[in-house]
Image (cartoon, helix red, strand yellow):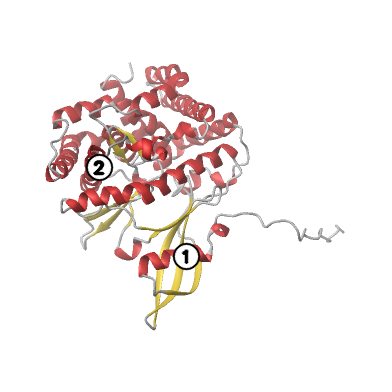
Amino acid sequence: MADQKAAAPDASAEPKKTPHSLIKEEQVRAALRADKGPDASLTSWGVKDFTKKGDNYACTVTSIEARYSLHGVEEEVTYIAKLNPCRQMGSLNSFTVVVFEKESGFYKEIAPLLDAELKSIGQKPLKFAKCFALSTETDSEVIILEDLRPAGFKMFDRRKGMDKAHVTLVVKELGRLHAASKLLMAKLPYKIEEKFPFIAKDFTSFNENKFHDIFQWYCINAAEMAERIGGYENVAKWLRDAAPNCIDMFEEQTKSNPPFEVICHGDAWNNNVLFRYDDEGVPVDVRLVDLQITRKSSPATDLNYLMYTSLNGNDRRENLDHILNAYYTSFSQVLREGKEQPPYTAEEMKKEYRAKHLFGLLMAIMVVPIVVSEASEVMDLDKVETDDVELFMKEQRERMLKQLDSNPLLRPRLLSVFDDMVEYGVIV
């Protein structure tokens, strides 16, 4: 019979840090005061998970259920908490520190300035979730936000490509964000990245060498998928040839390029947008979330990211003019209300959109397999123990190749991207 005795726990050992353990009562109290006012008194609180695998990558997202007393009345409220995921993969942890620095800094420093610009011209605040509390301690980061679910907002099914109605709402709000940043930057006596250095940080800021390796492997993995599909040997060769230079391509596509220079969302894809619907199921309002990769760049990077990760090929092609016109109308209207002339015409903006198709391709080969994946097909980053990038990406490749055969959504989405890039001369 096996020995059933277990070793006694080390009483002096610190408890293992988990994402949920990062939430402290004082943070919940601070969020409650910011939301409900100084007279609100917290009586109890707890954590309740609601997301599923595939919903989140850079952080752990959960909810906080709080009971409080206000003027003698007992009430309840929920908040959304974004937490450092406490992963074992070192390179991912360093990336997490950067994205929390960026999102916390955006909510604390830049969002209020953007909203002040919009308020001064009679516009409503930007459509983000309200931020109620922040903890920026390295490796223990917590952001507590408004829970938009009670107001009817919900995530769009990422496996479905956004249709015309959904994407129009998104680009109109991106237009307001970009225009507000134009108004703000025009008034600042300094470059915004000099005052707020976090806005200049990007993927390469956490570990340039590892990021280069990861991006290179995504190109190689996409080439393998193109070869597996067949008939796309030119695409596969281009991707393999481009792989060693992909980091330079990324930096060239995202660098500031006046007059196409705004504060971008940076991560505008299905998972980072919430919609509210009317009784007929028509989307009528939108909220942009996950401001972890905000950057100063061309507005065309946000548009290409959205169009090539979150739309089916037919919807993208058939509605392209409508979508870009809706974006430009929203963008230019805010500027004109702020007594500024748009710095470029609609046609110049469309030309810039085409000039940033390479960025759309780079994002698509990383994101599309995630977008269309079933929960069972998503790699659980919380269980990844290796820091060997090559091994990690080879496992990703095997997963993606299996998806080509098992997931009917992946092949047409990828091929629509490849076809566009060949037609538009990005892949030659």
Marks counted in the figure total 2
Q: Position of residue 149 (x, y in %)?
A: 35, 62
Quadrant of the image occupied by residue 122: bottom left
Quadrant of the image occupied by residue 17: bottom right
Q: Position of residue 178 (x, y in %)?
A: 25, 40
Of 198 and 350, the residue lying toward us: 198
Q: Where 80 falls versus 85 (above or below)?
A: below
Q: Is residue 227 left or right of residue 283?
A: right
What residue is pinned by disc 2? 184
Q: Position of residue 342 (x, y in %)?
A: 15, 35
What residue is pinned by disc 1? 28
Task: Estimate the spatial distance between the alpha carbons at disc 2 and disc 1, rounded to whole Å.
Answer: 32 Å
Q: Residues within 10 Å of mark 1 (few under 14, many from 20)?
A: many
Which residue is drawn at the image coordinates 23% and 37% (left, top)? 186
Residue that lies at the very extreme toward the bottom in this rendered image: 72
SS at circle 1: helix
Of 132 and 165, the residue lying toward us: 132
Amino acid type, label 1: Val
Whichever of labels 2 and 1 marks the residue nearer the N terminus, that label is 1
Which residue is drawn at the image coordinates 30% and 62% (left, top)? 152
